[in-house]
Amino acid sequence: MELQALPSRIGQVRRIVSAQLRYWHLDALIDRASLGVTELLSNVHRHAQPDKTCTVEIELLLDRLTVSVRDHDPRMPVVDDAEPLATCGRGLAMVAAMSESWGVRPDGESGKVVWFTLPTSSAAVAAPSRRARRTVLEKPVRRFAEVGHTVDGLRPEHAPARSAVAG
């Protein structure tokens, strides 16, 4: 969905993401996905130039949910160590802590995409891993999974589920 990253719209996007995850029966991911999308949209609201227009996309592959936010500002985000009493500056660190992986990549000549992934397997959703999180600064993204042979004779091995909602 495309939107202006304004505080009133951020809450609306959170509700849409939550509803989509319920539809996909991924209720256990709602809190983390909502937190992550809130942080990414807050960064667009606070930092993006020349405008606050962005696009939010959620993509579900069999074992991974990817949430991405695309904006028109080519400047890459910087993860700093926030001072103990600072009231901001921890958003991307929180995204890194609650996700399986996250990253940022340029999007054309005048923009970027910041994304994070969450595992969808029942064991990983119930008990998130304490292993080291990985940060990927640039990673090629496959927009659609290749469909090869079928797993159980009924569904393709890597069939993507995608959602698009007009904003």
Image (cartoon, rainbow, N blue to C red):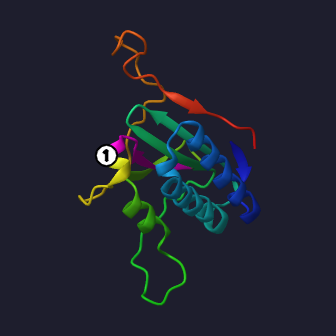
Name the side, left or right, on which 131 lies relative to 139.
left
Residue 34 image offset from top left, x and y in percent: 56, 56
Residue 157 image offset from top left, x and y in percent: 36, 19
Can residue 50 be seen by looking at this rendering? no
Residue 149 image offset from top left, x and y in percent: 34, 10
| Residue, far left | 131
Which residue appears at 69% of the width and 59% of the height?
11
Q: Would you call the spot at circle 1 few (<14 residues within 10 Å), some (14-19), or many (20 or more)? A: few
Q: Nearer the viewer, residue 27 or 85?
A: 27
Can residue 47 be seen by looking at this rendering? yes
Q: Is residue 131 magenta?
A: no
Name the side, left or right, on which 76 lies relative to 167.
left
The residue at which mark 1 appears reads as: 123
Quadrant including the N terminus: top right
Three-letter amino acid code at the position of disc 1: Ala
Q: Nearer the viewer, residue 44 or 149?
A: 149
Residue 73, quarter of the rendered image:
bottom right
Q: Is residue 150 above or below residue 65?
A: above
Q: Is residue 89 above or below residue 109?
A: below
Exactly how many numbered labels are in the figure?
A: 1
Q: Is residue 16 above or below residue 46?
A: above
Which residue appears at 41% of the width and 52% of the height?
103
- What segment carries the magenta color? 112-123
Residue 159 image offset from top left, x and y in percent: 45, 22
Secondary structure, magenta segment, majority class: strand
Which residue appears at 40% of the width and 52% of the height?
102
Q: Nearer the viewer, residue 139 or 35?
A: 35
